[in-house]
């Protein structure tokens, strides 16, 4: 069993350093800002043209990161919630001028139906943004953001994170061994299995608490608690990161300013407005899409650079 | 006694922040709901984090909390094949009963964030951190009363939290995506999730009933072994 | 030379102990020393090492003085002590705090308040010295036990200590990882001039590097001085003789070295070989008796293949194996070749992808599980995985009750007596030592009165005395009719006790023979004694078989 070989493949992903995508190599602050802005866009611009093009864009971003499977899976998973929103909105809400149908005293309006569909779209985008987020924003990058603000909590989170796979492996061993002495959670009623599972957990709890005493000793022996800790910054903030962050903030600032003027927001209640976008509306949409497509743009630029050089 | 007062202060502060934001949200009349509810959520957790951050914490204590949080997170894995049986809440409640409200909060919220690091983060992450954190806080607060040793009362406590947990978890998308928010909306949402919430509540009762005593004893025994007695006094 | 540390008239008693755990210790450590601390389990080695590490002082009563670099250790600040005195512990997994190697290295430096740029520089420097840039970004969960222990050593070295303490660092490692660890330790000592104190059970590899040996017995230092003299001192105590490594054992046992020439006692295969040839000694060899097994087959595996995940490589590939009643089969092979996996397949915890395994002529899959686990016992590498009650007696009673034995209390009592565990009966199994835990786990397994017992690395972490008594216990069980299959990387133990040896390599059994034929045909993969004496006695495997 080539454990070492496996480790290379896996840890490349875990560390995020060796990722093929340019976007993944940016400073975590920039990556985080991108996702925050993308999420905000999906909630602020409630307009079919905006939402559909944002959805297409985020699908493209996920395809670029080779997330096909997860994208599909997430869309399937979100289907129930989306359906619920599409159904609930018209039932719950009978405001609106255009009545489609009335049954059993419930008035279904075109406004509420539209609103439901738009919201379901917005939710789909949100879920897909998180698919991409989970791929690009590795745990280490995420913790890097917080290590300055909250070093102690970050440390706790990292230790807990280190324990989880260790405990899962330990649990598998305990499960095997205890099965030979009649404790098992593979067969029986849900009750019996839960009971057995919890007994196994109890063994895991005790063994882990015993072993972790040594972990604490190892920390103390290496100077933990002797003085104020510093934190090692693995990710550098380059000039490129600076430029991109500035552009992201400025661009999205402008978009939010437009949004405040009511641009890119379909008037729904009390009466469905026109889907038509004016010039500023189109301009704002282009800006939103440019920002959303940041990973694609970076990759495209990289591709051009290498092909033109040849 | 001082510690008790402090944790009530923290709790009060968190509650105050929440109330202010709720008021804010109501006056906004449904505009940008999700964003504000997120902010509300996160700021209400800040007092607890601030308390943890500014405390001098020894290696053994941080390890003890990490082990409990990791156990709580890991329980989600082997029980995954059993529908709606999740002992995470049980582990958090027992830990908090032994360790008190502040560590209880940290165990709960850390378990949430770390388990999502392996299962995938999503918009639900902060809500889970909040729910499990608050479950820890409330369990920690009642632990100071004599009646908290009563298994049956704890079962009721676990039962209620099963529902409260589900209700808060429903919020994040109902609040944002269904308009308008009336009592009717909420009731509809809760009816829809009733089966899941009931399962959660019943599994809490089941685990507390059968395992509370042994787990409480084990965690207390190791609390002594780790030398963590001073924290309460 | 300069003294780096001194321990003067030191006594220590644990808070709850009834007698002193360290008695009248007087020791001197000189700069650049490489000291091996030997003694059986429970003699106080760990307690002594911890006294040199102020942050880890156990709670208790101490008197006397410890001086480190000219000042009392007690006056040293915690930060200075953490940097100047490094400590590596036994269990590779438990010492790791972070989930990637680079974070683990950085963790030490973050603790002492190094700036980020400096951390980077010091990691770069250390990694270049140790040569493990390939591991730098690896997740610790993907490392082997040996690699983990190297990381643990590195994350102590990165603090640039003057004194390095190691508490049985190789006890959990396989022989190859042990050698790698020790050769790295040698480089650290030779090239950096670091002072090293290491406590060990298995002295074979470590003594040739040491210039000092300390011997501990029941909380007292009974010897301190040069290594060869120390071995003579160990030899003088019949209860400790098992600790003398294989090579010197042959010479001391056959009185080939006069007490006056003790400094000439060879410690390595090469020096032993040279000495024998120079002196033209003729040694004789007496084989241990291994009865020819004409019993019927109890277990048969045919063309067994196994992989963990769909596209993973095959861990076992077309493996064939046959075990007869009353056999003691040792499956040897490097770590990670699939020995543990094979055992799990044999007891039905994993299902083969191809091929079949038959127990007493019936396919494993067809057995009723409860019956299967009564017929086959399984002893895990981690004995604590077997426990789930608060006392040893209760552990046994509950198991007997579960097996529906008529008088559980009595059955439990008998088992306690059989394994010599009466004194531990009321203790919590979690509080027992590693060797005792293993006996308790064995007791739980034996209560089912299995016909076949599977053991996964049973000698891991045991001191030589415990190892021998385990071997003798298992031999007794074998004589009572139990069939044993053991996965082990301990060649000397396999050669000494097993009746069949099989080498697992590349997913299959490459050779299976009785121990003498098995090891005599091997050139690299054989016991130390065999490597030293093969030109004269090609079948000699252990020191007790060699006579002058």
Image (tube, coloured by chain):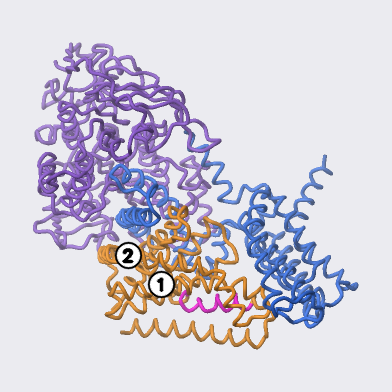
Tag 2 secondary structure: loop
Which chain does the residue under circle 1 lie in?
B
Q: Is residue C460 left or right of residue B12?
A: left
Where does label 1 land, which residue? B159
Q: Residue C46: horizontal and vertical position, in percent?
A: 23, 50
Q: Which chain is orange?
A: B
B39 in magenta: yes
On screen, C437 above or below A212?
above
**Nearest to the observer: residue C357 or residue A217:** C357
Q: Quadrant of the C terminus of chain C?
A: top left
Range of magenta residues: B36-49
On screen, B230 above or below C289?
below
Our reading of the magenta stretch's main secondary structure is: helix
Q: CA distance from mark 1 to mark 2?
A: 51 Å
Q: Is residue B63 left or right of residue A42?
A: left
On screen, B104 above or below C41?
below
Observer-side mark, 1 or 2, equals: 1
Which chain does the residue under circle 2 lie in?
C
- Residue drawn at x 54%, y 36% is C310
What number is the disc on residue B111?
Answer: none
Chain C image colour: purple
State which quadrant residue C471 falls in: top left
**Nearest to the observer: residue B16 or residue C112:** B16
């Amino acid at each position: 069993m080539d454990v070492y070989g496996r480790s290379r493949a896996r840890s490349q992903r875990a560390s995020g350093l060796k990722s093929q995508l340019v976007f993944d190599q940016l400073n975590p602050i920039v990556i985080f800002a991108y996702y925050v802005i993308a999420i905000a866009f999906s909630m602020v611009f409630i307009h079919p043209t905006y939402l559909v093009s944002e959805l297409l864009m985020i699908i493209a971003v996920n395809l670029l990161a080779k997330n096909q499977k997860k994208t599909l899976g997430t869309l399937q998973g979100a289907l129930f919630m989306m359906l619920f929103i599409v159904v609930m909105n018209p039932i719950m809400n009978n405001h609106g001028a255009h009545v489609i149908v009335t049954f059993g005293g419930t008035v279904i309006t075109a406004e509420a139906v539209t609103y439901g569909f738009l919201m379901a779209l917005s939710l789909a985008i949100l879920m897909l943004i998180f698919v991409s987020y989970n791929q690009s924003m590795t745990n280490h990058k995420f913790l890097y953001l917080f290590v300055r603000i909250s070093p102690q909590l970050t440390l706790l989170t990292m230790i807990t994170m280190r324990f989880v796979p260790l405990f899962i492996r330990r649990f598998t061993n305990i499960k095997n061994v205890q099965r030979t002495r009649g404790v098992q959670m593979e067969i029986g009623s849900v009750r019996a299995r839960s009971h057995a599972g919890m007994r196994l957990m109890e063994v895991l709890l005790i063994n882990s608490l015993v072993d972790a005493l040594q972990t604490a000793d190892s920390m103390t022996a290496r100077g933990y608690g002797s003085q104020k800790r510093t934190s090692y910054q693995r990710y550098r903030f380059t000039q490129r990161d600076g430029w991109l962050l500035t552009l992201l903030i400025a661009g999205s600032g402008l978009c939010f300013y437009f949004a405040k003027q009511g641009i890119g927001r379909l008037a729904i209640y009390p009466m469905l407005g026109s889907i038509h976008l004016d010039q500023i509306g189109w301009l704002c949409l282009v800006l939103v899409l440019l920002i959303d497509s940041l990973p694609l743009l970076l990759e495209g630029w990289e591709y051009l650079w290498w092909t033109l050089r040849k | 006694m001082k510690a008790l007062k402090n944790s009530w202060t923290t709790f009060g502060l968190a509650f105050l922040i929440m109330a202010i934001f709720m008021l804010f949200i109501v006056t906004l009349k449904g505009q940008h709901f999700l964003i504000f509810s997120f902010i509300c959520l996160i700021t209400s957790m800040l007092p607890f984090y601030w308390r943890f951050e500014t405390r001098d914490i020894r290696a053994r204590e941080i390890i003890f909390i990490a082990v409990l949080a990791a156990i709580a997170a890991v329980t989600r894995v082997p029980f995954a094949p059993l529908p709606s049986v999740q002992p995470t809440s049980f582990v958090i409640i027992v830990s908090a009963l032994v360790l008190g409200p502040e560590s209880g909060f940290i165990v709960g919220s850390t378990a949430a964030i770390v388990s999502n690091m392996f299962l995938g983060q999503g918009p639900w992450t902060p809500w889970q951190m909040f729910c499990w954190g608050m479950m820890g806080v409330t369990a920690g607060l009642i632990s100071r009363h004599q009646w908290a040793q009563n298994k049956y009362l704890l079962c009721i406590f676990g039962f209620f939290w099963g529902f409260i947990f589900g209700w808060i978890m429903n919020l994040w998308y109902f609040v944002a995506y269904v308009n308008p928010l009336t009592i009717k909306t909420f009731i509809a949402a809760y009816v829809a999730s009733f089966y899941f919430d009931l399962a959660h509540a019943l599994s809490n009762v089941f685990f507390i009933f059968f395992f509370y005593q042994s787990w409480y004893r084990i965690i207390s025994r190791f609390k002594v072994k780790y030398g963590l007695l001073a924290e309460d006094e | 030379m300069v003294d780096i540390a001194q321990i003067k008239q030191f006594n220590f008693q644990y808070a709850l102990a009834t007698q002193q755990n360290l008695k009248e210790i007087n020791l001197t450590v000189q700069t650049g020393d490489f000291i091996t601390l030997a003694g059986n389990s429970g003699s106080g080695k760990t307690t002594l090492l911890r006294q040199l590490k102020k942050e880890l002082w156990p709670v208790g009563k101490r008197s006397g003085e410890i001086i480190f670099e000219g000042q009392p250790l007690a006056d040293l600040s915690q930060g200075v002590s953490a940097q100047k005195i490094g400590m590596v512990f036994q269990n590779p997994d438990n010492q790791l705090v972070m989930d990637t190697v680079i974070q683990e290295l950085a963790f030490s430096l973050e603790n002492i308040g190094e700036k980020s740029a400096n951390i980077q520089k010091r990691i770069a420097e250390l990694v270049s010295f140790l040569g493990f840039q390939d591991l730098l970004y690896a997740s610790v969960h993907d490392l082997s036990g040996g690699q983990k222990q190297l990381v643990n050593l590195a994350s102590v070295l990165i603090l640039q200590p003057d004194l390095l303490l190691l508490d049985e660092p190789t006890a959990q490692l396989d022989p190859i990882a042990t050698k790698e660890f020790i050769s790295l330790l040698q480089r650290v000592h030779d090239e950096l001039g670091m002072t090293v104190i290491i406590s060990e059970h298995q002295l074979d590899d470590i003594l040739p590097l040491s210039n000092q040996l300390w011997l501990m017995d029941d909380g007292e230092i009974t010897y301190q001085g040069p290594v060869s003299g120390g071995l003579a001192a160990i030899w003088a105590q019949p209860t400790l003789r098992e600790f003398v490594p294989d090579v010197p054992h042959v010479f001391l046992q056959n009185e080939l070295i006069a007490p006056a020439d003790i400094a000439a006692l060879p410690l390595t295969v090469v020096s032993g070989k040279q000495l024998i040839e120079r002196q033209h000694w003729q040694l004789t060899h007496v084989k241990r008796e291994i009865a020819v097994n004409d019993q019927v087959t109890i277990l048969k595996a045919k063309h067994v293949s196994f992989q963990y995940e769909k596209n993973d490589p095959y861990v076992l590939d077309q493996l064939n194996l046959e075990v007869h009643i009353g056999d003691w089969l040792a499956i040897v092979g490097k770590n990670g070749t699939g020995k543990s996996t094979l055992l799990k397949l044999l007891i039905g915890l994993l299902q083969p992808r191809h091929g079949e395994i038959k127990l007493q002529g019936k396919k494993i899959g067809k057995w009723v599980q409860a019956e299967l686990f009564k017929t086959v016992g399984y002893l895990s590498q981690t004995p604590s995985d077997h426990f789930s009650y608060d006392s040893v007696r209760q552990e046994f009673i509950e198991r007997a009750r579960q097996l529906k034995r008529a008088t559980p209390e009595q059955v439990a009592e008998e088992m306690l007596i059989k394994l010599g565990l009466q004194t531990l009966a009321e203790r919590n199994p979690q509080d027992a030592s590693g060797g005792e835990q293993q006996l308790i786990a064995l007791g739980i397994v034996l209560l089912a009165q299995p016909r076949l017992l599977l053991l996964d690395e049973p000698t891991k972490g045991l001191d030589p005395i415990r190892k021998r008594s385990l071997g003798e216990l298992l031999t007794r069980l074998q004589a009572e009719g139990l069939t044993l299959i053991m996965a082990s990387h301990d060649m000397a133990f396999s050669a000494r006790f097993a009746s069949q040896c099989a080498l697992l390599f590349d997913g299959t059994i490459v050779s299976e023979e009785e121990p003498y034929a098995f090891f005599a045909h091997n050139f690299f993969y054989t016991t130390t004694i065999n490597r030293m004496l093969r030109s004269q006695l090609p079948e000699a495997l252990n020191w007790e078989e060699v006579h002058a």
